[in-house]
Image: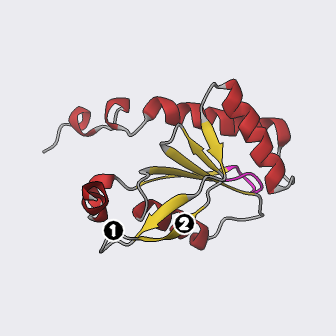
Amino acid sequence: MTNYNESRITNSNLLYPELSYQIQGSIFNVSNKYGKGLKESIYQKALAEELEKAELQYEQQKRINIYSLDSGKILGTYVPDFVVENKIIIEIKASAFTTRQDVRQQQSYLKASIYEVAYLVNFCTPQLFIKRSIYTNDRKPFIVKIRAS
């Protein structure tokens, strides 16, 4: 039988715990200040301000490569709303609901890119929607191929 304390997830075994905490705080600040009903572009600008206040480095609309899971060749690009500290992707939505397709798309981009953590945020759902997805590079066979080239 596993000891409960041994199986608990702690900050020491999370990917980017402090950065994730700062990003989530910035997202909550935007939601608390602006509420629901604005355009996606407004939420993007507001989040950019919050990330700056938190002194986080970010790029907006950064083109990131999507790789073939078999060959490691570049298949195309994806342009997320933000890449924070060159570690975490943030995709923003401003719609009445978040679809399964939105979540699957985010997870697919993680699976076929070099990034391991992504946030999908929808500011206009009845409750603020935040989905943190993880797909670690040790599970991506193409990583070895692109690092070798």
Q: Is residue 107 visible?
A: no
Residue 43 placement (x, y as % from top left): 78, 47
Residue at the image point whose x is 58% and y is 73% from the top: 101
Please name the residue that numbered disc 2 is placed on: 77
Residue at the image point whose x is 53% and y is 32% from the top: 21
Residue at the image point whose x is 63% and y is 70% from the top: 99
Circle 1 residues within 10 Å: few <14, some 14–19, many ≥20: many
Separation of disc 2 and disc 1 at Cα?
Answer: 13 Å
Q: Is residue 17 above or below residue 36?
A: above
Give the residue type that dot 1 points to: Gly
Frontmost residue, 94 versus 78: 78
Residue at the image point whose x is 72% and y is 32% from the top: 50
Which structural element holds mark 1?
Answer: loop
Residue 118 placement (x, y as % from top left): 51, 51
Magenta stretch: give its range: 121-128
Question: Is 130 a magenta residue?
Answer: no
Q: Is residue 130 visible?
A: yes
* Residue extending furthest toward the front: 149
The label on residue 72 is: 1
Instruction: Report whether 24 appears left or right of 111.
Output: right
Q: Quadrant of the N terminus?
A: top left
Give the residue type that dot 2 points to: Thr
Q: How many marks?
A: 2
Q: Quadrant of the C terminus?
A: bottom left
Its colouring scheme is secondary structure
Quick one: label 2 or label 1, which is nearer the N terminus?
Answer: 1
Residue 135 placement (x, y as % from top left): 38, 56
